[in-house]
Image (cartoon, grey):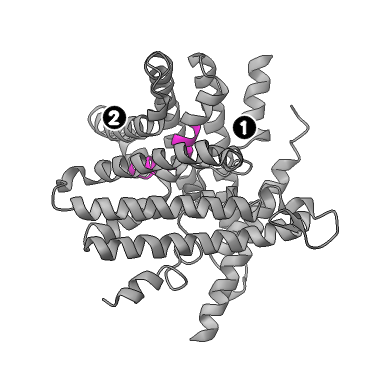
Amino acid sequence: MNKIKILTNGFIKENPTLVLVLGTCPSLAVTTSIFNALGMGMATTFVLLMSNALISLLKNVIPDKVRIPSYILVIATFVSIVDLVIQGFVPALSASLGIFIPLIVVNCIVLGRAEAFASKNTVFDSMLDGIGMGIGFTIAITIIAFFRELLGSGTLFGQTIIPFDGILIFVLAPGAFIVFGFTIAAVRWLQNRNK
Amino acid sequence: MYYILMIIGAVLVNNIILAQFLGICPFLGVSNKISTAVGMGAAVVFVMTLSTMVTSIINVYLLIPFNILFLQTIVFILVIAALVQMVEIILKKISPPLYQALGIFLPLITTNCAVLGVAILVTQKFPTSIFDSVIYTISIAVGFTLAIVIFAGLREQMDTVNIPKGMKGVPIALITAGILSLAFMGFAGLV
């Protein structure tokens, strides 16, 4: 398959969050500000890249029967690395993402790509796929965070854009569900219109 | 009184799905019918209670004394995955009717972030008390069941409604969940 196609597959066409609707928990929980969303996106991209590469390397060694636990172990290792690095170097991000960093382990996107792509393809292709899917996830949660931060507090990256008090509901839990729902609907509408 | 407040807080005020965003996948995936939602809820109550009991024992007697808390994520996810497999095998042998009812939901639970999420959450909230952890977990799981059953009821009603094409399925489900979450915010002053 075309290398560029593998990379860009996750951006829009098979966007893991907006089209396949995987990894919904972090998409709702960390999208209160763009800063959090970008941090979460980068952390997940790193885990996807590394776990896809390692699982692809080990695909002939891992017995078929214990492959899921093995994948989870590989993923959990990289998540622990990311968790410790963020705690050490960006404590503010660690405090605001909190429990959702260790929970990258159970993000369906990571395990899904390991099972659907990395276990069947070469190392380089798997790394491309990991980066592509990671960027797709980052784009999706950044879009959601953009609307939530702008409508909820009138700011972007903490800078005031619209000087108003903000619609509190968009920062709270209900706003997350509603913005996410409308974003998926918009993506579907755009995809159908292009057909 | 302490426990009553804790239970009300976990079930209604800080509902795990609608306020803390854990376990959204099963919440959206298995909520088409009330009967399957009840099954999923029961399976979650069962597995979550059991896994938190085991993980908090491991945390208190193994990870903290040996000062290896950085292994928490790896140890917990392995314990949960193994536990779910074991529960599945044991249920199959001991109680076929229960296995019939809960069986199909069990594999789904391993990747349910609520189970790992709660296991980590209680170690932060109650680092040393296993009993408190278990009570808190049971009430969280009850909150999960309550939310998913109410949501399934709403979605059953929605089948008969005419919805614009692009909003069908996940988008309208998410917006409904948002409104349900708004309703649950009304409990905020309770505790």
Residue picked out by circle 2:
B95
Viewer-closest of B122 and A41: A41
What's the distance in space between the residues labelled 1 and 2, CA to CA?
29 Å
User: Which secondary structure class fits the magenta region best?
Assistant: helix
Q: Is residue B170 magenta?
A: no
Label 2 crowd bin: few (<14), some (14–19), many (20+), radius 10 Å: few
- Where's residue B40, x and y in %? 44, 41
Which amino acid type corresponds to the residue marked 1 in the rendered image?
Answer: Val
- For the point 24% across and 60% down, the residue is A123
Residue picked out by circle 1:
B11
Viewer-closest of A180 and A76: A76
- The nearer-to-camera label among 1 and 2 is 1
Hey, which quadrant is residue B48 in on the image? top left
- Where's residue A100, x and y in %? 52, 42
- For the point 66% across and 28% down, the residue is B9
Which amino acid type corresponds to the residue marked 2 in the rendered image?
Answer: Ser
- Where's residue A76, x and y in %? 36, 40
* Label disc, if present, on residue B143 of the rendered structure: none
Q: Is residue B115 magenta?
A: yes
Disc 1 or 2, which lies upstream in sequence? 1
Point out the stretch of residues depicted in magenta.
B106-118
- For the point 56% across and 58% down, the residue is A141
Residue B28 shows in the view: no
